[in-house]
Image: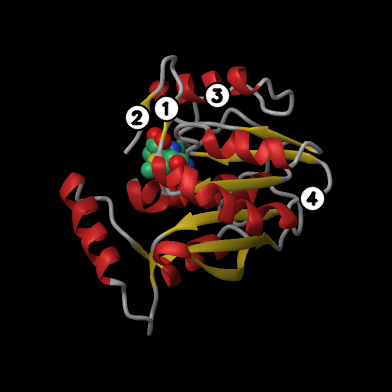
């Protein structure tokens, strides 16, 4: 859910609520310099928030939606931030991405609101672009073996599947298995407010199987 403000900027109440707690987990994990690629940037509010808090890093937002990209560009202009690049048109499921090597990848609230191919593409693309030990950070709601799913997440899952039967909360084990096929190991799981999780994956190989290395 997002609302329009007087220009192309859009604002999502959930994003305004979660960007602080996400930043508290994410930002200390990022390198001391370099390029952070954000997949599925949506309104752009996460990118500008993180960029403001981490002026030593450069952020590259992206989204396949032209409406999202217009909002992201408007937020960058309104905030006057020099360390956020113009948004890229990037579909995570595409075989090729319009960006080369990056130092970290961030993807918030996409895995459950996209077909599984987007998650496979996210792991393939991140695995091919990250340096050894580089991180892929994801945030969202997941299903966990042995952990009862919160009633609010069961309702959310049903709602997502009503929107598109290809959507829905993913089992954490399947996401981790997919990541490992691309040289990314699930290093940390952090419980977040509102029954969400932050996941931290680390690149453990120079060349991931099934993913073409990027120059
Ligand atoms: C619920 S929004 C989340 C936006 C933002 N990350 C946030 O948390 O506020 C989901 C976003 O995923 C994007 N998306 C959907 N499918 C995608 C794909 N295959 N590759 C990249 N982004 C995708 C949508 O365009 C949308 O901006």
Q: Pointer 1 and pointer 2: residues touching (CB < 8 Å)?
A: yes
Residue 113 appears at what percent x and percent y? 34, 47
Residue 172 appears at what percent x and percent y? 43, 69
Q: Which mark is residue 75?
A: 3
Q: Pointer 2 and pointer 4: residues touching (CB < 8 Å)?
A: no
Who comes first in sequence, dot 3 or dot 4?
A: 4
For image coordinates 41% across by 46% down, the residue present is 14
Instruction: Name the quadrant of the N terminus.
Output: top left
Which one is nearer the viewer's eye here, 212 or 166? Answer: 166
Q: Check disc 1 and report its element: helix, strand or loop.
A: strand
Q: In this figure, which residue is indicated by the disc labeled 1? A: 10
Q: Give the spatial CA distance, label 1 vs label 2.
A: 6 Å
For image coordinates 68% across by 47% down, the residue present is 104
For image coordinates 38% across by 81% down, the residue present is 147
Q: In this figure, which residue is indicated by the disc labeled 2? A: 3
Q: Considering only vertical position in the picture, is 180 above or below 57?
A: below
In the displayed structure, does residue 67 sit left or right of residue 181?
left
Who comes first in sequence, dot 1 or dot 2?
A: 2
Characterize the local packing of mark 2: few (<14), some (14-19) or many (20 or more) Cα atoms within 10 angstroms: few
Who comes first in sequence, dot 2 or dot 4?
A: 2
Asked if one can make out residue 93 in the rendered structure from this viewpoint, the answer is no
Characterize the local packing of mark 4: few (<14), some (14-19) or many (20 or more) Cα atoms within 10 angstroms: some
Q: Quadrant of residue 4?
A: top left
Q: Nearer the viewer, mark 1 or mark 4?
A: 1
């Amino acid at each position: 859910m997002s609302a329009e403000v007087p220009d192309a900027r859009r604002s999502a109440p959930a994003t305004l609520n979660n960007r602080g707690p996400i930043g508290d987990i994410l930002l200390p994990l990022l390198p001391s310099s370099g390029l952070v690629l954000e997949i599925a940037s949506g309104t752009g509010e996460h990118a500008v928030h993180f960029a403001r808090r981490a002026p030593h890093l450069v952020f590259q937002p992206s989204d396949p939606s032209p409406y999202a990209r217009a909002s992201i560009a408007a937020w960058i202009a309104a905030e006057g931030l020099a360390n956020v690049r113009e948004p890229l048109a990037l579909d995570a499921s595409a075989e090729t991405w319009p960006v080369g090597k990056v130092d970290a990848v961030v993807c918030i609230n996409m895995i459950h609101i996209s077909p599984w191919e987007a998650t496979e593409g996210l792991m393939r693309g991140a695995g091919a672009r990250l340096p050894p030990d580089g991180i892929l950070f994801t945030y969202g709601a997941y299903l966990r073996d042995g952990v009862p799913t919160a009633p609010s997440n069961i309702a959310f899952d049903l709602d997502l599947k009503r929107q598109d039967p290809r959507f829905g909360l993913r089992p954490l084990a399947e996401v981790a298995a997919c990541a490992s096929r691309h040289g990314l190991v699930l290093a940390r799981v952090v419980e977040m407010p509102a029954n969400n999780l932050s996941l931290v994956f680390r690149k453990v190989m120079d060349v991931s199987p099934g993913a073409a290395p990027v120059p």
